[in-house]
Image: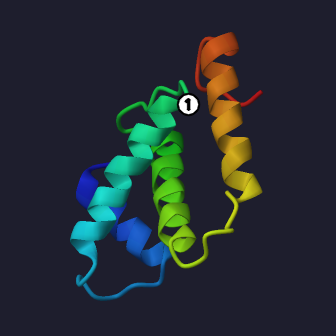
Amino acid sequence: MNDADKLKILKQDLQMITSANDEYLQNLLSLSAERIRGEGITLIENDIRSDMAQIQYAAYLYRKRAAADTVMPRYLRFELNNMKFSQKYGGGTSDI
């Protein structure tokens, strides 16, 4: 999935129809990828699981700015944990 597709899906997740926040959202996509890599997870190019984790993380970061006490959604934390464990211990990208 290319960056334009990721931005489009992120905007759908956030229910945005204008391009007013596109630059900010693109920066959140970059930040989310960096933070995921910081957790020791390898993002695989053109892998739906990696792409959606990055998009969901960016959506979380966007929503978090509205409320400082917002915690990471469980589904996202579970997905990141599963990705990390399967990459570190399973040798691939399959679920545990």
From this viewpoint, is residue 55 visible?
yes
Query: What residue does disc 1 label?
Result: 39
Q: Is mark 1 on a helix, strand or loop?
A: loop
From this viewpoint, is residue 5 visible?
no
| Residue 18, quarter of the rendered image | bottom left
Q: Residues within 10 Å of mark 1 (few under 14, many from 20)?
A: few
Colour option used:
rainbow
Left or right: residue 53 compared with residue 24: right
Left or right: residue 20 compared with residue 96: left
Residue at position x 40%, y 42% in the image:
33
**Farthest residue toward the bottom?**
18
| Residue 85, quarter of the rendered image | top right
Q: How many labels does the image show?
A: 1
**Farthest residue toward the front?**
68
Residue at position x 33%, y 67% in the image:
25
3 relative to 84, above or below? below
Residue at position x 53%, y 58% in the image:
56
The C terminus lies in quadrant = top right
Coordinates of residue 19 in the picture (x, y in percent): 23, 82
Seen from the viewer's position, the closer of residues 58 and 52 is 58
1 relative to 61, above or below? above
Coordinates of residue 62 in the picture (x, y in percent): 47, 69
The amino acid type found where label 1 is placed reads Glu
Coordinates of residue 10 in the picture (x, y in percent): 42, 67
Residue at position x 39%, y 39% in the image:
34
| Residue 84, quarter of the rendered image | top right
Coordinates of residue 37 in the picture (x, y in percent): 46, 31
38 relative to 75, above or below? above
